[in-house]
Amino acid sequence: MRKALLTVISFTLCLYITSCSQSSKPEKARTIETIATDAQQTLSFNHEPLSIDPIGIGDIIVTDTFLILALNKEENMLHVYNLPHLQFLGSFQKIGNGPDEVILPSAFTQWFNKDGQIQLVMRSYQKFTGLLNISKSLIENKAIYDNKYTYNAPKGKNSFQQSSVSYLLGDSIFLINRSIIMRPQDNQNDFFEVYDYKNDSILRSFYASNFPKELLEHHGRDQAFQKDIAISNDCKKMVIAYRFLNMISIVN
């Protein structure tokens, strides 16, 4: 008898919950899509902590078996450790106006593995973009560049001077993003140029955003348009994440 009564109560409760859920106002639908299906592997270390002040780290990147820290206040700004043991291998790359020195180094954006040699893309503000050979630099105890692209050609110089960041798409082909403070007042959308370094020519240009006029003319647009950019290893796709606009743009 008790078992039958419990069954009736449970059935009645289920009907009540169902009727309430049907009569209540439906929630706004949410779409969740998994985009990062090929994310980098999480690294786990079992070692003594490194004696490095985290506040002094300007940037950090993992390139194959190297962990590279940019310590911009050090005489040799790039400090290299091996993975996974985090053994210190050496430091190099001076800040200055010398031939292989960098002025106001920018954030790490790209690296390549060419014939087993790790090349880190370094950009010296208003000066050059170069392929820094990590292994050769460690052996020579100084910065060794496999190739450097200087900003001397007329069209290239103008584009690089107006840029906020640039990417190397292939042999001497650059993708250049114009800084927001350098964009024309009549169109503040995200502007990119594909530049041929060898021939000093703009192959094409395009906008990666199409924001409404009200946002483009807003006095706080400089903050609103702050973003992070990532480019795939094959340089065929670019992802732009706008920090304050709740928006991610994927560009072919």
Image (cartoon, rainbow, N blue to C red):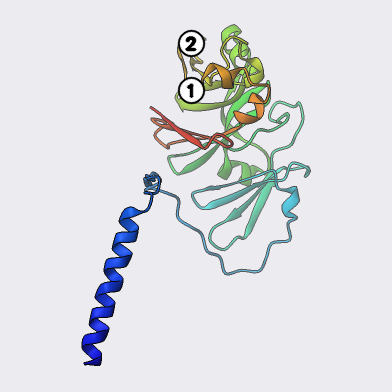
Tell me the residue that label 2 is attached to. 202
**Quarter of the figure that contains the C terminus:** top left
Q: Which residue is mark 1?
A: 209
Total marks in image: 2
Inter-mark Cα distance, 1 to 2: 20 Å
Asked if residue 199 shows in the view, the reply is: no
Q: Position of residue 70 (x, y in %)?
A: 68, 44
Image quadrant where residue 89 sits = bottom right
Q: Is residue 199 left or right of residue 237?
A: right
For the point 75% across and 55% down, the residue is: 53
Q: Earlier in the sequence, mark 1 or mark 2?
A: 2
What kind of residue is marked 2?
Answer: Ile
Q: Secondary structure at mark 1?
A: loop
Amino acid at dot 1: Ser
Foreground: 171 or 108?
A: 108
- Say which quarter of the image contains residue 186: top right
Q: Closest to the observer: 101 or 245?
A: 245
Q: Residue at x 73, y 61 (%)?
A: 51
Q: Is residue 1 visible?
A: yes
How far across and how far down the image is residue 251, in percent? Answer: 41, 28
**Residue 106: percent from the left, percent from the top?**
65, 33
Q: Which residue occupies 58% across, 17% down?
A: 188
Image point (61%, 18%), residue name: 160
State the SS at label 2. strand
